[in-house]
Image (spheres, rainbow, N blue to C red):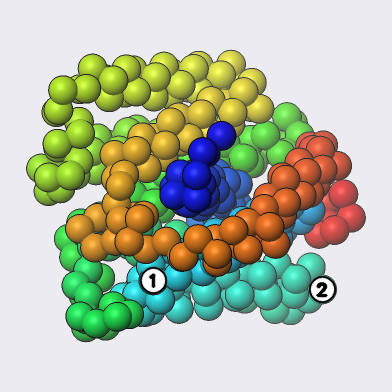
């Protein structure tokens, strides 16, 4: 345990840094599958199957999205300078993400209460899933590139509205869509009964999106190695063998995911995919450390004062376990496979 107030301050900073990354990781793993299923629905012709995709996520989609709210709350409460400046920098893509999430929720609720406008809600659901993924991926790539700050007691973003657009951020937007398509097609296979035709359609998507995701990851890693000195210094530094072991762990998880998928072990395929995502996400967090936003904010410079951090910890520290139990309970209750004729909220 920390021996003095200085060590306690550092301990709390690291704890909330990890909690922020953990919340974002859960959002990527849980809502990423929902969003990927939404993109998949754009290529499904049977209206009953499109309705079934929405029903498949009926009991869990709102809890999955709550992790994004949790991450925003942690960022606001513990790293407010990053919250203020990053949201200014990423105002346009985050507005589009927010609107897309709202449009997607509206489509989910209206689709199963409509007759003549079902096609409209189907299309809105798929397109909103696509734009959420693309612009969230762009925002993530733009954060890795950093941004300029004003001078003064409270530094904030000093660039233009479109500075977030770059070849790298466009690529990370595409990569997010591709990776989520793999997660979404695995989710569809796991949620529908084994006799449903949509599972065969999803299996073909798994094959295609698997190889596309491999290309996306390799290109992103190589591009990051060449573009970001803070990444090259870690990956090619004296502990390069540690990062080599991390890469081997990712390859092992991906091979097990692929093998499970081919043998129809849908749950294990999802778990192995999420294991690979978790390893890569943690590797990225430790690669960036001590930066929260590379070349812009370290976790030390961006953290709230000790009193604010301790107060926030006492007020919100118990919230994360409650969220975990809430998420687990919903997944457990709605774990059964469904058919394409299952209605939203009635399975």
Q: Secondary structure at mark 1?
A: helix
Residue sitting at x 12%, y 45%: 229
262 horizontally vs 161: left or right: right
| Residue on which disc 2 sits | 113
Q: Earlier in the sequence, mark 2 or mark 1?
A: 1
Q: How far apart are the two marked residues, 2 and 1, measured between alpha carbons? A: 44 Å
Residue 297 picture location, percent across and down: 29, 61
| Residue on which disc 1 sits | 81
Disc 1: CA contacts within 10 A as few (<14), some (14-19) or many (>=20): many
Residue sitting at x 52%, y 74%: 98
- Between 121 and 133, the one lying in front of the other is 133
Disc 2: CA contacts within 10 A as few (<14), some (14-19) or many (>=20): few
Residue 135 picture location, percent across and down: 39, 66
Q: Secondary structure at mark 2?
A: loop
Residue 144 picture location, percent across and down: 27, 55
26 horizontally vs 234: left or right: right
What number is the disc on residue 332?
none
């Amino acid at each position: 345990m920390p021996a003095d107030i200085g060590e306690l301050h550092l301990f709390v900073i690291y704890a909330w840094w990890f909690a922020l990354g953990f919340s974002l990781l859960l959002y990527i793993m849980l809502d990423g599958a929902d969003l990927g299923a939404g993109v998949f629905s754009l290529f499904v012709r049977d209206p009953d199957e499109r309705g079934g995709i929405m029903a498949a996520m009926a009991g869990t989609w709102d809890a999955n999205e709550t992790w994004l709210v949790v991450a925003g709350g942690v960022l606001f409460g513990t790293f407010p300078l990053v919250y203020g400046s990053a949201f200014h920098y990423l105002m346009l893509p985050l507005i589009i993400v927010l609107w897309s999430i709202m449009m997607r929720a509206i489509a989910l609720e209206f689709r199963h209460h409509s007759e003549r406008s079902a096609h409209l809600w189907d299309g809105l659901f798929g397109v909103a899933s696509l734009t959420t993924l693309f612009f969230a991926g762009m925002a993530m790539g733009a954060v890795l590139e950093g941004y300029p700050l004003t001078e003064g007691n409270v530094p904030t973003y000093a660039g233009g509205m479109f500075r977030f657009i770059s070849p790298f951020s466009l690529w990370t937007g595409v990569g997010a869509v591709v990776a989520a398509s793999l997660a979404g097609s695995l989710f569809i296979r796991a949620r529908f009964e084994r006799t449903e035709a949509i599972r065969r359609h999803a299996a073909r998507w798994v094959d295609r999106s698997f190889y596309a995701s491999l290309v996306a990851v390799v290109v992103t890693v190589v591009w990051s190695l060449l573009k970001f000195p803070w990444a090259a210094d870690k990956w090619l530094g004296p502990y390069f063998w540690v990062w080599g072991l991390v890469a081997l762990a990712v390859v092992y998880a991906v091979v097990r995911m692929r093998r499970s998928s081919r043998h129809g072990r849908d749950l294990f395929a999802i778990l192995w995919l999420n294991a690979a995502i978790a390893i890569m996400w943690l590797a990225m967090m430790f690669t960036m450390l001590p930066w929260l936003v590379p070349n812009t904010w370290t976790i030390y410079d961006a953290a709230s004062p000790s009193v604010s951090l301790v107060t926030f910890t006492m007020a919100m520290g118990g919230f994360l376990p409650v969220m975990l139990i809430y998420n687990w309970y919903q997944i457990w209750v709605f774990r059964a496979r469904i058919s394409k004729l299952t209605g939203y909220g009635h399975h």
